[in-house]
Amino acid sequence: MQIFNFLQLLRIVAIASALAGLTGSAAAQERVTVGATRAASNGALFLAAGKGYFKEEGLDVELKFYTAQQAVSALATGEADLAAAEFTPAAFNFAGKGAFKAIAAQAREFNGFEGNEIVASNAAYAKGLRKLEDLSGKTVGITQLGSVYHYQIAQIARLKRFDFKNVLLKTYPSLDALAAAVSKDQLDAAILPATLARDILTASQAKLVGWYSDVDQQQVGALFASAKMIAGRRASVEKFVRAYQRGAADFAAALLRKDRYAKRVSDANSRSAALIVAKYIYPSESSDRAASLIEGTAYYTDPQGRFDVGDIYDQVTWFKSQGLIEAGTDARDILDLSFVKGHTNSPK
C-alpha cells in the first residue's frame, strides 16, 4: 500500500511539474500585435509566423488584418505594436511626425522578378496600346491617389519621357473592381498585382503591356514599429526583426530561385513555403490553388530585410511634390536603420 501511494505521489508530482512547465512557457511568451495586409508582399512575415520563428524568440504574435491604410492607422493609434504594409501618404505622414518608424524592408520591385503588371484592355490594345510609352493620353485606373499604383504610373511617365498630366487617372474602390473594369473595356489600362493580372490575362480579358520591375525598382513597403514599442520594448523589437529576417531568408531561398533559363524554380521546397504563406493570404481558397498563386507571383524580398534607402527618399520627394504628404516631412525621420544592417543605396 505504501509503495502504491508513493507511486501515486510521483505521478502527481510529475503531472504538476509538466503543468508548471507549460504555464511557465506560456508566461514567457511576450504578446506582440502586428497589423498586416493579406498580400503576397508580406510573404516573409507569414513564413516566419507559420514556421514558428517568432515563438522561438519568445514572442506570441497576434496578426490583425487590414488594408494598407488601416494597418498604419492601427499602428499610429496603438491598436498594433508593429505593422507590415505598403508605403502610403498616411505612412509617410505618421512616421514623419514620430508615431512610428520603418525598421525593415517588405517587398521590392526588382528587375528580373515579376511584380506589379501593367495591363491593357482588349479594346485599348487593339487600338495600339502595346508598350508603356503608349499610356500617354490614356485612361488609367488606380485604387486611390497616393497608392503604390499612382506612384508607379507617375514614374513610368518620367522614365518613358511623357507628360504625366496627359494620363487621365480614374479611381476604383478596390483592386478587384479595377481588374473588372479593365476586363470589361471600361478602362484603357491599369497596374495590378501579379495575382489579379494573371487571372484576367489567362482568361484573355486583357493584354500584358509590361512589368513595373522592367523600368524601376521601387521599395514597395516596410515593417513598421511604433515609437512606443521602440522606446519601451526595444529588445522585443530586435527579437521580432531576427525572426522576420529568418522568414525573409527562407522566402528568398524557397520562392525566388531561378533556373538557368531565368524561370522560377518550382519544387518541393517552393511548394512547402507557398503552402504556409498561402493560408494567410488566401484563407478561402483551396490550398493547391492558393499555393500555385504564391509560387508563380512571389514578390522580390531582400533576404536580410534591407531597404533600398535611396528609393524611399525619392518616394518622399515625389509625394511632397504632389501635395500628398506634408511639406516638412523628412525621409530621415521615417526610417530607423539600426535594426537591420547593410541597407542598400544611399540617398540620391
Image (cartoon, helix red, strand yellow):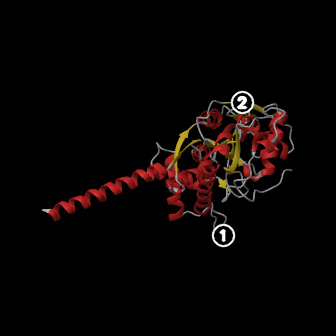
Determine the residue located farthest toward the bottom in the rendered image: 260
Residue 80 x, y percent position in the rendering: 59, 38
Between residues 298 and 79, which one lies in front from this camera angle?
79
Secondary structure type for disc 1: loop
> In the figure, residue 2 lies in which quadrant?
bottom left
Per the image, the residue denoted by label 1 is 260
Residue found 74% across the figure and 51% down from its top = 337
Determine the residue located farthest toward the front in the rendered image: 2
> In the figure, residue 13 lies in which quadrant?
bottom left
The residues bearing labels 2 and 1 have C-alpha atoms spaced at a distance of: 41 Å
Name the quarter where the N terminus is drawn. bottom left
Residue 21 x, y percent position in the rendering: 39, 55
Which amino acid, by three-letter code, is at mark 2? Lys
Within 10 Å of disc 2 (Cα), the crowding (few <14, some 14-19, many 20+) is: some
Per the image, the residue denoted by label 2 is 170
Is any atom of residue 184 visible in this view?
A: no
Secondary structure type for disc 2: strand
Residue found 78% across the figure and 33% down from its top = 325
Residue 41 x, y percent position in the rendering: 63, 48
Relative to residue 77, is residue 160 depicted above or below? below
Residue 30 x, y percent position in the rendering: 52, 48
Q: Which of disc 1 and disc 2 is earlier in sequence? A: 2
Between residues 232 and 316, which one lies in front from this camera angle?
232
